[in-house]
Image (spheres, helix red, strand yellow):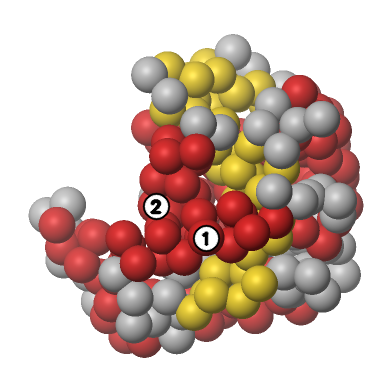
Amino acid sequence: MSMNVAIDGPAGAGKSTIAKKVAAKMEYIYVDTGAMYRSLALYFIRKGINKDDEAKISEAVKECDVTIEYEDGQQQVLLNGENVTGLIRTEEVGNMASSSSTYKAVRAKLLDLQRKLASENDVIMDGRDIGTVILPNAQAKIFLTASVDTRANRRYKELKDKGESPDLEKIKKDIEERDYRDSHRDEAPLKQADDAVLVDTSDMSIDEVTDRLIEIIKSKI
Ligand code: DC
């Protein structure tokens, strides 16, 4: 049987950074489900669909085929055969993903793909509903979080390092709005599974969080 680790938590808690490191150390495949929602979001943006138009988005999602591949251990997301990995990390795509992922048709599109990956491989899968909906039987579940201030500061630094001129207050507001949307939607809201271990990364270094997660996973296998 494959080994499944579910990591859920809000945007900016460090899920992908940590999950990648843990996956490399444990020789599991890292599956970034947010990237899948982002690739669909890119499609809706390209089609000029409004993020609140559930009917149009539910139609358009039928035209999408999302697959993933690994290049040098890095996840690549393909949207209708096009590698969109480098195009989905913008705020615009993130905001569209947060809105469109509230729709049933969008979530249904990705559910089978995510479950299939987990049934065929040892995976560390990160997202919002992995421990609660996608992989309720995952052997290890972690809920990774951090304060809004910490997450906003991390994002600010990330953008600054990229040469952009970010606005900290706006980042904070966006994070609060996204948290609210992700955790108050009807379909698969962001919430800690009953059997998930809570890890607050606000005052922890990346190495400390990585070690803590490996300790948790090893205690479950
Ligand atoms: O983790 P991320 O920022 O790349 O995710 C983008 C959006 O996708 C996020 O706001 C909510 C949605 N998402 C989701 O609904 N379920 C997941 N398993 C992963 C992401």
Q: Is residue 160 left or right of residue 56?
A: left
Nearest to the observer: residue 211 or residue 19: 211
**Residue named by callout 1:** 215
What residue is drawn where x is 86% and y is 51%?
A: 137
Q: Are marks 2 and 1 in contact (CB under 8 Å)?
A: no
35 shown above or below 153: above
Residue 193 is situated, as x and y percent measured from the top left of the image, at: 79, 70
Q: Amino acid at mark 2?
A: Thr
**Looking at the image, is mark 2 or mark 1 nearer the viewer?**
1
Taking the spot 76% from the left edge, 51% from the top edge, the residue there is 139
- The residue where tag 2 is placed is 17
For marks 2 and 1, give the CA distance: 17 Å
Task: Check the picture and name the quadrant holding the N terminus.
Answer: top right
Question: In the rendered image of this protein, does residue 215 appear above or below residue 29?
Answer: below
At which x and y percent is residue 39? 58, 36
Q: Examine the image and state in which quarter residue 128 appears.
A: bottom right
Residue 98: in sight, yes or no? Answer: no
Q: Nearer the viewer, residue 95 or 147?
A: 147
Residue at 16% across, 63% down: 160
Say how many tags the image has. 2
